[in-house]
Image (cartoon, rainbow, N blue to C red):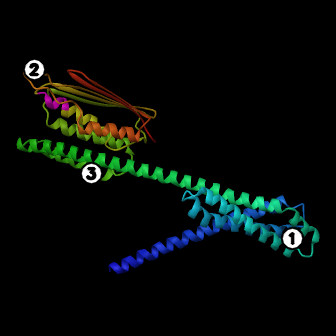
Amino acid sequence: MITKISNLEESRIKERFLNSTRKNLWYHIFFWLIVLFVLVITDRNQYEFHTTLLKEVVNVIFYAIVVYFNLLFLIPHYFKEGKLLSYAIFLFFSVLLIYPIKTLCLYIMFIGSPLIQQGFVDNQAFIFLSSLFVGASSTIFQILSDWQKSDVEKRELEYKTTQTELNFLRSQINPHFLFNTLNNLYALTLKKSDSAPETVLKLSEIMRYMLYECNEAQVLLRKEINYLKNYIELERLRLNDSFEIKLAVNGEIGHHKIAPLLLTPFIENAFKHGINQQLDKGYIHITIGIEGEMLHLSIQNSKGNKGPQEKPLKKSGGIGLQNVKRRLEILYPSTHQLDIVDDIDHYNINLKIKLDE
């Protein structure tokens, strides 16, 4: 079975190689036909058409010999190995060897036209320099081609690295949310609360969103906001009425898109490092405003009071907030603004993002 799979994969690789080779072959043929057309048009007034065409076909054939000898032998074995002086010498002598053969071929082909033959003899310097120019031009083309290929590979590597980092950050965020919500459900089941079924339903919606909706680079903003509402409601279920939790959504959501799970760490941070450190009373005010292409997230939450004998609170933030800052730098490098105010009794976050349609 393994042998069959290997043979199948090998045949596919061969087929892709042959298809690529055929494709490149047609590109090369098309290129030389264009060169031939340009040479014929340029030289059309000097001789009759059939004479010009025959002469330029010979020119193109010998130009191609110089170019492919340069591309397939001289550049790989000398130029790319850093042997620049040897490369220049071999290129020069290659052209020096080829151009007399080209002149001889043209001379023989036009044996019945002494004036044309004399023109070839008189223009030896031009024939040599034009061949040398074509060879040098192919070197410049190869340098530019290699540079472009290297640039594309560099960009692909940067993109893959960025995507790997994003996937790593998201893999840290998702279990964090799941851990918190399961803790909430566990607390409610211990109390035998009537809110437990509703919590399970909210958790189910949250898990569905995280597992099936968040695999894309961007999701609809309305789905992200609906996820936030479910998360907030799930947190609200375990808190008493002394805690004030408000969520306001203003503006037209439309068909805007946003990176998934980008806003939730800020809200999680408000619960984890704000209300969770207070025995009673406290508030979280969340406002999401959409104006044109701009999204404005504003979160204000109270913080627990410290008595003189109490240990200092942990610094607000944590892995979730650090991750979302990094994701913002990657996904919205020049289209977001994040301001955080961490005072003694309250914590404010103001985030602005330019959204995509």
State the residue position of label 2: 307
Query: The N terminus is located in which quarter?
Result: bottom left
Q: Between marks 1 and 3, how big is the CA–CA gap?
A: 74 Å
Residue 343 placement, left or right of 102: left
List the residue tagged with mark 1: 50
Residue 185 position within the rendered picture, expressed as x and y whole percent measured from the top left? 13, 44
Q: Give residue 133's quadrant in the image.
A: bottom right
Task: Write down the region rendered in magenta.
Answer: 273-278
Q: Earlier in the sequence, mark 2 or mark 1?
A: 1
Q: Is residue 187 left or right of residue 68?
A: left
The amino acid sitting under disc 2 is: Gly
Q: Inspect the image, locate mark 1, and give the three-letter code of the amino acid beneath it.
A: His
Note whether 258 is above or below 112 in the view shown: above
Q: Crowding near pointer 3: few (<14 within 10 Å), some, many (20+)?
A: few
Asked whether residue 32 appears in the rendered view, the answer is no
Residue 210 position in % (x across, y down): 28, 49
Q: Position of residue 102 (x, y in %)?
A: 78, 70
- Viewer-nearest of labels 1 and 3? 1
Q: Is residue 253 magenta?
A: no
Q: Secondary structure at mark 1?
A: helix
Question: Is disc 3 placed on a helix, strand or loop?
Answer: helix
